[in-house]
Structure formats: structure tokens, C-alpha cells
Amino acid sequence: MSAPAATQSGPTLKRSLGLFAIVGLGLGYMTPTVVFDTFGIVSKQTNGAVPSSYVIALVIMLLTAISYGKMVRVFPSAGSAFTYVRESIHPNIGFMVGWSSLLDYLLLPMVNALIIRLYVEQLWPDFPAWLTVVIYAVVATGIIAYSMRSTSNVNMVLLVAALVVMIVFVVIVVGQLTNGEGAGTIVSSTPFSHDGVSLGPLLTGATVVCFSFIGFDAVTMYTEEAKSTKIMPKAILLTVLLGGLIFLVASYFTQLRFPDNEPFGEFTDDPLPQIGLIVGGPVFQAFFVGAGFVAAVASGLASHASVARMLLVMGRNNVLPKAVFGRVSARTHTPIFNVVLVGVVCLLAISLDLELVSAFINFGALIAFTAVNLSVIFHFAIRKKQVEGARQVFTNIVLPGIAMVLTGILWTQLHADALIAGVIWAAIGFIWLLIITRGFRRQPQGFDENQPVTGFNKLAIEDDEDQPAKG
């Protein structure tokens, strides 16, 4: 028998997270080193203007972050695009947004397995790629099946370690640029614009680098653990702004050092190991890849636990078959079936490439971002009728409207295969919605509980899921 769901009168979450602790959790989820993983792909697409794509993505993400900040004030106990759309627009539309987000959750653990596979392929080319993925999937599944706990302190240590390595990288690159390597200068507009750069490819590149920002919205899951709910809008904005600045600085100096992809040879799909080797030699490469590896593993475990819990909630709420997805093991007190299912999805990393997988993930993420911006218009402008004066019109209609349109434009630039797969996934969700609502005669249940259990860094005083099942 499955463990009981958390309730309002049950265990509560300790309010111990300050502003920078929450921002650190968000940055850790975003995985700063991913800027190097996708650099070769975006540099090829943009003809050597990766920083410009980051500027476009950062502007759009900041506008979307403002919308998240407005909605988290209204719904502080369950921060998700699904909840915002469900309550502001319509439960059925909320379900479809949540279903699209589920695709992101399912594929995020797999993309980390893929990144690790690409690292191993470059460092040890004779080692079977499929075996790397299988080992990762088995180990990750085993860890999550045994315990789904983590701590913000561990996350912060990993984040700081990755940032230190990135700072060392920038310092080395600055020295090499002043000695005439790469572009031969540390101040140049070339990484942003030069002959052969046009808006269309930059937008396409921006759809890829949006992948770097995936996870900033996870900050909303820590609302109940924040020392004050008032800091949440600022935490969301700071997470996007600081993350964007990290990506922008890293991509700027990397683009100056590598104006084109020729030095990466056949490894443009994930040039991080090659970047480390060329910039600092074998020793620095070891630290550089180590930082990327640790970041990928940490992000993989976090997202694995996150989607397993999300599936558990969907099972408990009868959004998915409860007998399968809503069960918690009496032995490990974790949702074993869900954890193993995500581990099986990770095996797809054996054959897929990073560009296509990032596009799959961005399909659902961009839909969710667009929907959150739309929910601001519906909640504040339409439902609350807060459109008196230029300021309210600007903040409740114009800003989210611009963000919605820009996010929609990025969505249209996605890889064609991702659009096809996304439409198929949405069609499956729509059919399932018809089934569980009996032809729209009842409302679909939620993806969230009152206490957000889709997070992974919960500092709970107690946790029902960690108690033995009763009955």
C-alpha cells in the first residue's frame, strides 16, 4: 500500500533558506558548465556568434522570470507552470502545459547521461559508449531508488567548485588572448556580430542555449522553505540574471579563443574536453572535465529524483494509474517503479545526440514559459482587471505579452524532429486527458501537492515519504 500524501496538517518544511541559498540552488540546477557542452553546436549554427544567442535568450528569460515572480506571489505553496495556468486560465489547459513539462522532466536525467557519454567517448574512445550509459543509468537508478534525499549544502559546494574552474579557465584564456592566440584581443564585438551573422541563425542558436537556463523555474519549489516568501521574485530574477551573466562571460571568452570549430575536430557535439585540453593541457583538462562530470552527475541525480516524485504525485492524484505510479516501496520508501522507469529512459542516451535532445527538452520548456506569461495576463488583467493606468497595463499586459511572443518565436525555431515528437507527445496527453476527464465532464487532478514534492533539496523536519507505508 502506498504511503499517504502530505497534507496541510502534516509535516512542514523548515524555513531556513535565504536569498542566496535559493539562488545557489537554482544555479546548481542550471549547471553552469553546460555552456561549454553546447558551444560547438551553437557556434556552428550562428557562424561564431554564440554570445549574441545568449543575449537574446537572457532577455527572454528575464521577462519570463518577471512573470514567474508575479505568479509565485499569488500561488506561493505550489510553484509550477501547471498550477499557474490551471488556476488562472483553465484546468484542462493547465494539464496540457503540465504534460508538456513532464517531457522535460523525463528527458533531463537522460541528457546528463548523454553528456557523460560524450566525455568518455573523447577521453577513452575505445570504451564502449553504450556501456557508459548503462553503467550511469544503473548507478543513478540505484542511488535514487535507495534514497531520494539531498542537501542544499552539497549543491552549493558543487556549484562553487564548478565556478572556480570556470574562473581559472577565463584567466588562462585572457592570458592566451593577450599573447595573440585566438582572436588576439580581449575586447572585441566580433563574438556578437560580424560578416555572415544574421538574425535567423541567432534565434536558432537561442533556442539551443535556452537549454542552459532550464531549471531556473525550479526556484519556485523552494517557496515554503524560504525565510520569507517576499524574497522569491528577487531570487528568481537573480538566478536568471547571474546564470545568464555566467553563460555570457564564458561564451564570450570561449568565442574569442575559438572563433570557429576547427580546433574541435569531430567533437563539435560536446567540445568541453577539447576546450580544456587546448586551453590548459592534460592536467587542466582533467579538472575541466571533472567539473563538467560532477555537474552532470549532480544535475542528473537531482532531475532523476525530481521526475520520480512528480510521477508519484501524478499517480497519487490519479492523473496516472495509481496502482503503478502511486506506489511507494515498503522497503526503500521510494517510488521504485518511477525511479526505474526514468532509468530506462536514460538508456536512450546510447544513440541520441545532444542537439536533438536539447530541442526535445526545449519544446516543453518553451511551452511552459509561454503559458506562464499568458497566465499573468489572464490572472491580473482579465480576472483581477488590474489594467488601470499605464503602469498596470505595462506590467500586466505589455511585458508578459512581449515575453510570450518572443518565447513563441523561439519555439518555432526548434529542430523539426523535436516539433514532430512534441506534437505526438501532446496528442498522447490530449487523448489521456479525454480519458481521465471522461470527455471533459470532470476536471483533471493536479500535478502538485500542497507541499511541493517535485523538488530534491527539501530540508524537511519530517517527510511522510521516508516513513514506512502503513496498512
Image (cartoon, helix red, strand yellow):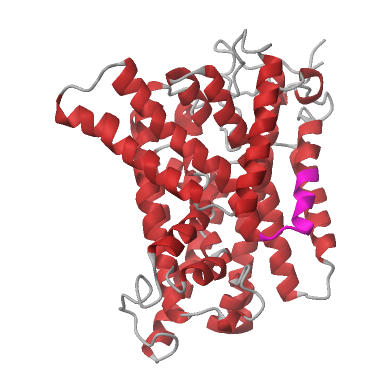
Q: Taking 178 as reference, is 242 above or below it? A: above
The image quadrant of residue 261 is bottom right
* Residue at (52, 47) in percent of width and height: 214
Question: Is 374 on the left-hand or right-hand side of 304?
Answer: left
**Vertical placement of residue 272 versus 390, above or below:** below
Q: Which is nearer the eye, 9 or 418?
A: 418
Q: Residue at x 46, y 50 (%)?
A: 410
Question: Which residue range is magenta in the image?
Answer: 344-353
- Left or right: where 436 falls relative to 74: right
Residue 336, magenta (yes or no): no
Label tally: 0
Can you name the residue that lies furthest to the top here?
A: 441
On the question of residue 435 being in view, the answer is yes
Magenta-colored segment: predominant secondary structure:
helix
Q: Quadrant of the C terminus?
A: top right
Give the side of residue 109 with respect to residue 368, left or right: right
State whether residue 298 appears in this view.
Answer: no
Residue extending farthest left: 389
Q: Position of residue 136 (x, y in %)?
A: 78, 54
Query: Which of 427/53 is in front?
Result: 427
Q: Position of residue 451 (x, y in %)?
A: 55, 22
In which quadrant will I find the N terminus? top right
Nearer to me, 113 or 393: 393
Residue 260 location, x and y as percent?
Answer: 50, 80
Residue 170 in which image quadrant: bottom left
Residue at 52% x, 57% y: name it: 208
Question: Between 318 and 135, which is closer to the camera in this rendering?
Answer: 318
**Residue 88, position as x, y percentages in the image:** 42, 20
